[in-house]
Amino acid sequence: MLVPIETAISILKENKPVAIPTETVYGMAGVINNEDALKSIFSIKERPFFDPLIVHVSSIKMAQKYTSNWTENAEKLAQHFWPGPLTLILDKGELVSSLITSGLDKVGLRMPDHPLTLELIEKLQTPLAAPSANKFKKTSPTCAEHVSDEFGEDFPILDGGQTQFGIESTVVGVFDDHIKIYRPGVITKDDLQDVLDIPVEHAPSPVAPGQLKHHYMPNIPITLTTNHKLDLTDYQDHYVWKLPADPVLVARELYSQFRQAAKQGHKGILIIYQNDFHQDEKWKGVLNRISKAKTYEI
């Protein structure tokens, strides 16, 4: 059910969730100052409470209220990349419910780059907790239709069109002397290194979402291979996708391709890609999602 922004505000004020557009994927949003709203997100998504949520803000000033330690490095990153697909993991402030952080002492903060959602948060004057608007471990939505497919036509959606980037935000732990990339995305290690003159490294962490072995999975199995000479006889009932050399294009189409292949009745998806993609930082976000979504690798 597509709703205008004023209706979305009314629903959120009733402590019920609304699907919201961002530049990455659509989120299932609830106000962060009501535990019933937060619990409903976990319930509808069938998401375990050990998987933390990201807090979405409309300004740097708002973000500063929800961390106990807004550091110089956090300020530099926010000034350079916000609004945009970068989540900062910082010390949790007193205003942040432990439901959001899964009981941990860190919170993920980000300012999404979508005018409708920024307007929504600004008018509410409270941040929104918003994981992706899909069932837990399943493929994230990149348009309003995907949300309706997942939760039915009655679920309220603030329609902001097709998302720009197609995969979730880069998530980083911000420290005084280094940065850790907990979840890769379209903002790369090199991008971060250009802004901060401190070491940047990849390192998974329980304080960030999307850390399980399997995630982002469509309703049909994915087989992943770098073997371009593979005999396709056994895959005639599969959707075969040979990835083009542009990671930006692949990221934008990734989840739509997953959903479309399932809708078309294919038995599975065969993804063929170049092995040297692993050497390119720009591919890390895409390959991270595909690797977690796959069922088989040959």
Image (spheres, rainbow, N blue to C red):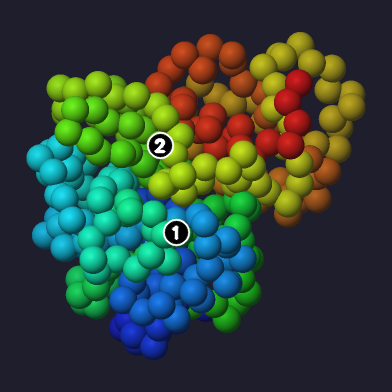
Q: Position of residue 217 (x, y in %)?
A: 65, 46
Q: Quadrant of residue 120?
A: bottom left
Mark 2: secondary structure: strand
For disc 2, the neighbor class at 10 Å (few under 14, some 14 to 19, many from 20) is: many
Q: Quadrant of residue 136?
A: bottom right
Residue under the image location 31 percent in, 39 percent down: 173
Looking at the rendered structure, the kind of residue marked 1 is: Ser
* Residue placed under numbered mark 2 in the picture: 182
Q: Quadrant of residue 16?
A: bottom left
Residue 88 or 95: which is nearer the viewer? 95
Task: Decide: is 207 above or below 141.
Answer: above
Q: In the picture, which quadrant includes the C terminus? A: top right
**Left or right: 100 as drawn, with respect to 61:** right
Q: Which mark is residue 5?
A: none
Mark 1: secondary structure: loop
**Left or right: 145 as drawn, with respect to 33:** right
Foreground: disc 1 or disc 2:
1
**Left or right: 274 as drawn, with respect to 177:** right
* Residue placed under numbered mark 1 in the picture: 102
For disc 1, the neighbor class at 10 Å (few under 14, some 14 to 19, many from 20) is: some
Q: Position of residue 32 (x, y in %)?
A: 33, 71
